[in-house]
Image (cartoon, rainbow, N blue to C red):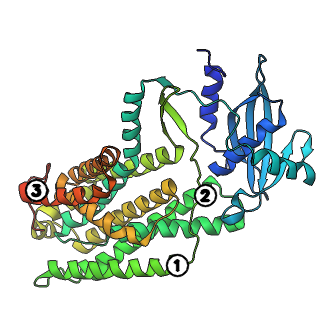
Amino acid sequence: MKRRPTRALLAVAALGALGTGCGGVVDADQAQLCERVAPALHPDGTTVARTSVAPSGPGTVGVRLSYLARERNAAAVPGTLTCLFAAPYGEGRLDLVGVRTVEGLMDDSQLLILKRWWLEAHAGPDSAPPVPLMALGPAPAYVLQQLLNALAPMALFAALATAFTLIHGLTGRIVLAIGEVAITGGAAMLVAAGAAQAAGPLTLVHLALAVLVAVASGALWAFAIGRFVLWRFRDRRNAGQGVLIASIGLALVLREALGLQQRGVDGWLPPLWHASLPLAGSDAFAATTTPATLAAVLATGGAVALAVAGLKFSAFGRCWRAMADDPRMAELCGVAPERLLAATCLISGGLAGLAGAMLVLVFGSVDAALGLPLTLKSLAAAILGGVGSVPGAALGGMAIGLLETLWSSAFDIAYRDVVMYALLIVALAVRPQGLFGTSPRDL
């Protein structure tokens, strides 16, 4: 069967679907709406393939679409289109207020006709569906789709399990506030991104700064836990229970504070980089992902890999391992415990804050109620991989994320958390040291 656009045309379109300009990021819903406008500018039967999309320019809210239009039995011709919207977020985010073509800005009557008689009558773009980069049957493509769906949870739980194990491996204390620290980081990213959007279109620089704000927020909260909880309880009898209770109290404080802050507030990040990228499949079914998911996985996975490599090859890692193995001997050899604990908490909190930021990037928002499930699942991942082993905890987090996704794809999702928490009980009963731990540590 002959495909409507050529493969080269669709390859260019797939690259353009990243939805980025040289300095900005694009709302995927706005880009899709603009793509629906393009066929209205050409004769009936014209198919449109997006080649690139970028922000509309300084002082405006919108997207500039470049595309190739192919009429029946004719060669494809390039075109450009700029769609302007009422607001970068909120109710006006998808309110089309202007369309600029090569002939100039549409007048009010043309815009009214376009919105009322074209957009309302066409639920989707009159464009050719993109062809996957690799041909694959429906069944293998479905399996591949579930593996792609698992990438974000795997990276998320790997980061949280690593953050949990960095603190527990050093101190032997359980901190049940890792999930809340991650959610706090995600909330900080939303606040930073909202402040940037209030000043104009959100750019890549703004987005990167918002992620850094999330990392800094998580690092500072974890530092506070280390300074005012872990360090103060270091020499007390029954310190483990004290730290556990204090961390639960802090988790409740953060959860309630975030819940009050989110009440009545529309805290959502626009769907940036959410254009679908078909990777493999056929006309019947194609496995897809989004640039936002790929960016989140690369950022979080890179941070986890950097933390694991740092523990193995850096001076900090040598001090951490020495203190984890024999605290008194490490201190006699010149390791400063308070400084090491502070650095460990900063790294752990930074990982948790980054995980929260990636939640926002992929899913658009965070909720205060997510903190406890994230904490318990990161604990399960750390135990599964090995509480005393940071690489093992990261692998355990990847296993938890994969199992969650595969269960959701094949069985009733209502029982997913039951299975995950049952896995924690089985792991504790059968192999307390985890799959990669060498010696069980008191939990």
* Callout 1 secondary element: loop
User: Toward the viewer: 378 or 438?
Assistant: 378
The numbered dot on residue 263 is: 1
Q: How many marks?
A: 3
Mark 2 neighbour class, 10 Å CA radius: few under 14, some 14 to 19, many 20 or more = many
Q: Percent x, y for residue 92?
A: 72, 63
Q: Do the CB atoms of the residues marked 1 and 2 lie less than 8 Å apart?
A: no
Q: Percent x, y for residue 327?
A: 13, 68
Amino acid on which the number 1 mark rests in the picture: Arg
Residue 96 picture quarter: bottom right
Regarding residue 8, the answer to whether it shows in the image is yes
How far separated are the C-alphas under marks 1 and 3?
41 Å
The nearer-to-camera label among 1 and 3 is 1
Q: Residue at x 29, y 55 (%)?
A: 416
The numbered dot on residue 270 is: 2
Q: Residue at x 34, y 47 (%)?
A: 405
Amino acid on which the number 3 mark rests in the picture: Gln
Which image quarter holds the N terminus?
top right
Q: Do the CB atoms of the residues marked 3 and 2 lie less than 8 Å apart?
A: no
Q: Earlier in the sequence, mark 1 or mark 2?
A: 1
The numbered dot on residue 433 is: 3
How far separated are the C-alphas under marks 1 and 2?
19 Å
Amino acid on which the number 2 mark rests in the picture: Pro
* Callout 3 secondary element: loop
Q: Residue at x 80, y 50 (%)?
A: 115
Q: Earlier in the sequence, mark 3 or mark 2?
A: 2
The numbered dot on residue 100 is: none
User: Toward the viewer: 336 or 362?
Assistant: 362
Q: Earlier in the sequence, mark 1 or mark 3?
A: 1
Mark 3 neighbour class, 10 Å CA radius: few under 14, some 14 to 19, many 20 or more = many
Q: Percent x, y for residue 111?
A: 86, 50
